[in-house]
Image (cartoon, rainbow, N blue to C red):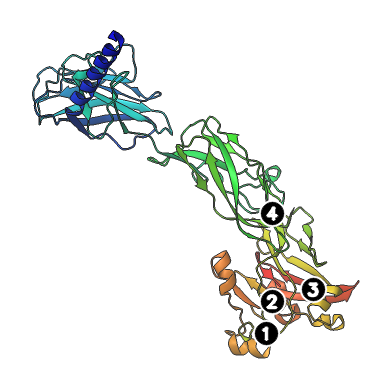
Amino acid sequence: MAGLSAALLLAGVLNANVFAASNKPYSLSGVPATIAAGANPGIAIEVSNDTKTQQLGSMEITLPSGFTFSDDGTGTYGSATSPDSSSPTAGLLPGTTNVLAVQNLSLQPGHVATIDITDVVAPGCTSLAWNFSAQQANSWNSGNGANYLTLTGGTYTPSGSFKNQPVSTADGCALSFSVSPAVEPADAGAGQIITGTALTPPGAGGSPVSVQVVDTTTGKPIDVATDVTLSLNTVRLDDATSSASLSGSGPIATDSTGKATFAASVNAGGAFTFTATASNSAIAPATSTQFRIWGAAATCSASGCSLPLGASNGENLTLTSSSTQGAVGASFDIVSFDCSSAQYGGVAGIPNTQTVAWTVVNPSDATGLKTTSIFIPDSLLTQTGVDPLLAVHYMVCLSAPFQFHVAWTPDSLTNGANGLAQPDGLVSGIMGGSWYRGLLPDCQDVGGATSGNPCVSSRIHANGGLTVTVESTVADPWLR
């Protein structure tokens, strides 16, 4: 029975302590919502005694693990002023680097004291909490629970240290593809390591995709150890592609500068973005700019470059370029368009084959001749309602990010501006910028592609199909 009485008595004392502390409130202002990684000098915190009769005599400010108070070079870590005391003190609690002890405040009800912290040194990318504890006594007494005041908005803990819970203060940081030395992804071929230079793998001088940890307060790179993983976001897939997968996604550990570098590749053509996610949940994720994966790609050399590409329906393409530097890429693209309307100089009901997209990346020879040969088998011509014997009259519908002269038809001069390709809202909406669509003229009618106008140089029906050859001196057309 004596044991039961002792337990009840102890419970009564504990409840009394909770009640006493909960009726002795104090509040804070000036605690920063975020602080940057590294040194943060000159933090001033105001302490308000919101009790009715008790003084606020001392405080302990405890930083999270990894945070430290730093002195001003003279051994001083902070100072305190109080309207009710001529000798308040502020200094490191002996044996610690993250607890500031403030004493002799004698702060009376309704009054405000100021605590000036010389410097807080914070690690990068943390989301931890400061602890603020206050007592009535001018000299700190951790053993007396009834001596504590309660931080408004905090949590009184009637066990252990009795410390009131925190105002959350953390450095904000995030991943970035755009802050140097990070590298945004550029176009690449299917299965090719993606770098920051279009169609240029690492062996040819491209820098692999990388992600940098940055301080969101300053926007500058910071050295933070974490693992980073890439995920693939599909904007659209090329024709005959049902899915795409990412290789080399990580996780990759950041290096000594806070950067993670990836040997990433995508196995199928389309338009994509990357999302980078850190294992440290305090680091915000980042999404890259959009990039293009071509169904096939080739690097140009002294003899130029040539690129074959086949489709599941038997149609295939060979892209060649006289460029001696750079690279070429091509895909059978999923974007469907045609020139059957009068706006684009065509006639309704004209059958179409698949859309072919291609690009030439050439830093030194933007005007080099590019030749694209498209082979269309008789079986596909028949499926689309074209008599193979009449295939030599096949025309090419082109959409390109530049305006060009179109083939003469009864409608091309009537609806076109002096026979020029017309704005292509469909492709412009997908690719951005201004794109133009129209039927390509024959090269003999415009003086050849070297005149600057893309054109059809030949149509040859042989070997069970039609080969249409297009010549251009500019990059990035889409043709059908």
Cα distance between the residues tagged 1 and 4: 35 Å
Q: Name the residue under label 4.
A: 326
Q: Mark 2 points at which residue?
A: 397
Query: Between disc 1 and disc 2, whose residue precedes?
Result: 1
Query: Between disc 4 and disc 3, whose residue precedes?
Result: 4
**Residue 149 at x, y percent in the picture:** 20, 25
Please state which amino acid type lies under the numbered disc 4. Gly
Q: Name the residue under label 1.
A: 346
Query: Between disc 2 and disc 3, whose residue precedes?
Result: 2
Per the image, label 3 sits on a secondary structure element best described as: strand
Image depth: mark 3 or mark 1 in front:
1
Q: Report whether residue 188 is seen.
A: yes
Per the image, label 2 sits on a secondary structure element best described as: strand
Query: Between disc 4 and disc 2, whose residue precedes?
Result: 4
At 55% across and 68% down in the image, what residue appears? Answer: 429
Quarter of the image with the N terminus is top left
Q: Name the residue under label 3.
A: 468
Query: Between disc 1 and disc 4, whose residue precedes?
Result: 4
**Residue 412 at x, y percent in the picture:** 64, 86
At 42% across and 32% down in the image, what residue appears? Answer: 126
Q: Mark 2–mark 3 contact, CB under 8 Å?
A: no
- Image quadrant assignment for residue 331: bottom right
Please state which amino acid type lies under the numbered disc 3. Val
Q: Mark 1–mark 2 contact, CB under 8 Å?
A: yes
Q: Is residue 283 left or right of residue 91?
A: right
Please state which amino acid type lies under the numbered disc 2. Cys
**Residue 339 at x, y percent in the picture:** 66, 80
Per the image, label 1 sits on a secondary structure element best described as: loop
Image depth: mark 4 or mark 3 in front:
3
Please state which amino acid type lies under the numbered disc 1. Gly
